[in-house]
Each structure stands twice: as structure tokens, then as C-alpha cells.
Image: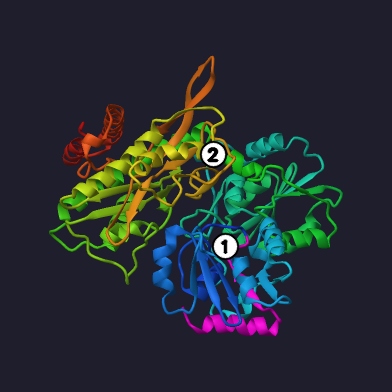
Amino acid sequence: MNMNNIEKLRSYMRKEKIDAFIIPGNDPHFSEYVADYWKCREWISGFTGSAATVAVTCNKAALWTDSRYFLQAENQLEGSGIELKKIGLDETETITEWLHSNLNANAKTGIDEKLFSIIEYEDLQNQLLPLKLVSVSDPFVEIWENRPEMPQNKAFLLNKKFCGKTSTEKLKDIETAFGNTKDTVYIISALDEIAWLFNLRGSDIDYNPVAIAYAIIDFPNLHLFIDTKKISSDDMKTLTANNVQLHEYNDFIKFPEFIDNKKTVTINRKKTSIYVYNILKKNNLKTKIETNVNGIISSLKSIKNKTEISGFRHAMIADGIALTKFFIWLEQNIGKTKITELDVSAKLHEFRAKNKLFAGESFETISAYAEHGAIVHYEPTEETDIEIKKQSFLLIDSGAQYLNGTTDITRTLHLGKPSAAEKTDYTLVLKGNLALSMAKFPKGTRGTQLDMLARQPLCANGKNYRHGTGHGIGHFLNVHEGPQSIRMNENPVVLEYGMITSNEPGIYITGKYGIRIENLILCKPYKTTDFGEFMQFETISLAPIDTKALDKKLLTRDEINTLNRYHEMTYKKLSPHLNAQEKKWLKKKTQKI
């Protein structure tokens, strides 16, 4: 980070008579990852994690982030003059508390109106009182020299053989969920929701196969606001044939011209920016807040159809083949030639890229050796890269985007002789993973109610992890997808048949190692009895779980049988695609314990 960047912002603040400015890490579409053009928080702070917010006053600056990024933030903020605020700790003041303690009663706090949702804006406004909140247009247009351009990558329509439904069919599903749509207009800002509805995929954002766009549903018509140069003439014809009217992305500000002002515009308070809301108010358009707080499209998208589930299964096989070949390569070369964390990432990419449906990683590979494993979302760089030796744990959390599905899998390998403490920690994490995978639960259960299954083995030993246990997975879309989750924090969304969620307990010993074991699990029927309908999970990820650091004495008979069945399934599904040497290796790694 250039130390002058904060001063450039302060100069802008003085000119606009603003006493503080808040910079989140998102874009106008509230994406988890953002295109370089919107990496304003990174430009200001130097912090590269995906979740953080910076606040700047005339003489102070601070950054708030969660436990996944504490160690990373400490390293990247060193010498920046920006104070780290650790979210979740009792002693950590909130952004608004910090602003109240650093500003006088008449101060003004500025935000970019495109980067705050309606609900965020209203909450911030209330919490700041009596301080004033001022929404402005993007100040970084003025102060960020050589700012990256808006992404110009090509977009394309995904074939129905991969997604299972046309956009017209999905529109009918939305219409059914809405009920009466005669006088309804619906604005969509979230890029993954637009991608799902239009079966549109792109590469404007790293790891998320989406295109920068807005959309409006004016039943039965669709409006898509996108840089039309990104779309081929054939795809243009297909969109037009499906009642899609195309507009340029920058023309979204004129969207009231394209809709009937007699209709009511439905918006989602979590996913619509105050910028969009201000346009609605300026044009005196009737608005209605969507009752489904997560959004109708988000809920529909989370329940995978038969074609998508089939695609996921094939993607898991492709990923399992790549991982098997990678593990063999690592085992054959570790200790014989220098291998670093970045080498691991590059080699995994090489094996995955051999599949014809491969479309890139689903997130930056976490290749973390020894003490780096304790940094929950560690991403090796040229500066941090270290050699992997035959001494400690190597944690590899990686995933891929395939045209037929998205993967996310973590394996932790011990490359030396594990100590008794390391074996205990490893086995407790595995017990948690197995417990969640074996869960049987009544229909209507929330992920929050299942989270403790994964934590219990660790908690019984006075240990825990600070991240969630499970997140939803998109179908050739965002690797982190709502609305469901499995975590300690309350989430009212119930688990539904067809939802695919991660199962990833872990433990992190600062300065020593990290252990995480992750599979993806599909929610499906179990049985119906006089007591009601029951659900279960099916583990769909396919790769051997390392047993070198396992303490079998700590496992129950049910846990042993579950692990053995998983390995039997893994061998059965992957072996037909492997050569004799690879089959022999996999047979050994999946043998019964």
C-alpha cells in the first residue's frame, strides 16, 4: 500500500467537508470477491482478504475483519498506520462506536452510495446518530490514479444440458414463488442471481464465473444491463428469443425509462444499494420490500435440480481424479526435490486443467504448510511462500469450477511422524466431520441446529474453531452461496432437499499447524415415519482422507464404518479412470482401517 493513498482520501474528504469515510470490500452487486476496479479497500489498506471494512478520519484509520483473517491482517497492516480491529472479541468496538469516540457531534461520515445496501445504510444511519451520514458518488474515480478498468471479459450462455432449465422456465418458477406478478417489477443486483436466471456465465471476477450486470424482471419480460460487447451475436439472438431486452451496463441509471411507472417495484433490502433506492425515490416509483429476506432467486437457486446434481457428481469424479494424481505426485517428489506452497497450487491447477470441462479455480488455493496452516484463509504469495518438508501438516483447501459443477475440498496430510497431540487434534476434527455427515434430522431443521455435531468432539476436549462449519455451494457459480449455512450464528433458513453444503470442521494451533477436513454434502430424504419426514446427508466429494495422523482408538465403531464406506465409494468411483499404478496407490489409501 502506498502511504499516500490515505492522504489522498483525506484530501478529498476535506474538499467535500466530510470528517470520516467508510470503505467496505464489496462492489455495487455485493459480491464476495470483486473485480480489480472495485478493490478500493485493498488500495487504501494493503489488506487483501475478502472480508474487511476500513474507516478513515482526518487523523486515524482502522480496519475491521473476522477471525479468519486476524493473522493475515496483522502481517499486511504492519507499518501502515491502520489499526486492526478484531471482530468477535468482547473488547473490540464497532465501526460506529469507534467513529463516535473519534468525531465531534456535528461530524459527517461519508460512504459510496453504490457500496451499501438499503439495510446497511439504514442501520449505519441509526447507529451513527447524532452524527450525519452522507452518501456520495465513488470518490476513488477522482483519487485513484491508474485505477484498473472495468472488466471487459467475454460472457456466454450455459447450455441447458448443464443447468437443466432455460431462463424462461426459471422465470416461471420465480413467478410461482411471487404469486401475483401482474403489477410487479423486480430488480436484481446480485451477479450470481443474474447468472442463474439467464444461464449466463463470465469471468469478470476471479473465481466466480459471473459477468458484471444488473437485471430487471418486468413479467413476462426481462431486462439485462451489461456491456453488450461481452456477448456473442448467437447468444444475443438466444436472449432476445427469450424476451430479454439488452441494455448497456452504464444505462442502468436510466432504468425507470424501461418500466411501467404504474407498477410496483419489488426490491430486496439486503441486496439493493442505496444508490438504486435513491433512483427509485427520485422517479417517484412505488416500491415494495421483498418479504423473503434472502431473496426468492437465492432460495430457488440453492435447491439444485436433477441435472445440476448429476453435474455435481461428475464434477466430483473429475476433481477426485485430479486430486489423486496430485497426491501421488506429491508423495513421489516430497524430499527429493524442492516443493513450495506455490508449487502445490500450480500442480493442482495443472492436474485439474486436464479436464475438458475445467473453467478455473473456485477460490485461491490455500496451500498451507506447518504454522501457515494456523492462518485460516492463508494464501501463499511470493513473499510468504515456504518449502514443504517431511515434518509437519500440509493443509490444502482448494476447489474448481467445471461447466457441470463447483468443487471445494480440504485435505490435511502429515508429511512426517505425527506426535500424540497432532494425532489427537487430527482425529477430533475427523470425528466432527463424520458426525455431521452421519446426521439424520427432521425436515425443517436449520443448519444452526446441526453445527454442534461437528464441534462436539473438539469442544469435549476444550477446543474449538472460530469459522462456520458449512456454506452453500453454487452450481458452476459462487463457491460460497446462501441462503443456508451450518454455523453457530443463528440462520433461520431451513435445510431443503437438493441443497449442497460444505462440511469443514478444523482446529488451528498458532505458530504450529492447522487441520481441516472438508467434503461437500447433499441434503436428501432419509425416511418418513409416524413422527414425520426425516432428512440426511450424502457426502459427494471424492478423495482419500489421510489416515496417517489418525488415532483409531478415539473413533467409535460407527465412525470407523462410515470412514470405511466413504473410502470404498471413493475407490469404486475413481478407479475406473485411473491407470494400474494409480489404482494401486488409491487402493492402499482407501483400505479399511
x then y, percent, for residue 142: 63, 80
Out of 181 and 488, give the one closest to the viewer. Answer: 488
- In primary-sequence order, the first of circles 1 and 2 is 1
x then y, percent, for residue 324: 26, 44
Tell me if residue 302 is in the magenta stretch.
no
Q: In whole angstroms, how far apart are the C-alphas of marks 1 and 2?
A: 31 Å
Label 2 sits on a secondary structure element that is helix
Residue designated by label 2: 160
- The 10 Å Cα crowd at callout 2, few under 14, some 14 to 19, many 20 or more, is few
Residue designated by label 1: 26
Seen in the image, is 153 located left or right of residue 197? left
Label 1 sits on a secondary structure element that is loop
Which segment is the magenta one? 1-28
- Given this view, does label 1 or label 2 mark the residue nearer the observer? 1
x then y, percent, for residue 314: 39, 37
Under mark 1, the amino acid is Asn
Under mark 2, the amino acid is Lys
Seen in the image, is 44 located left or right of residue 216? left
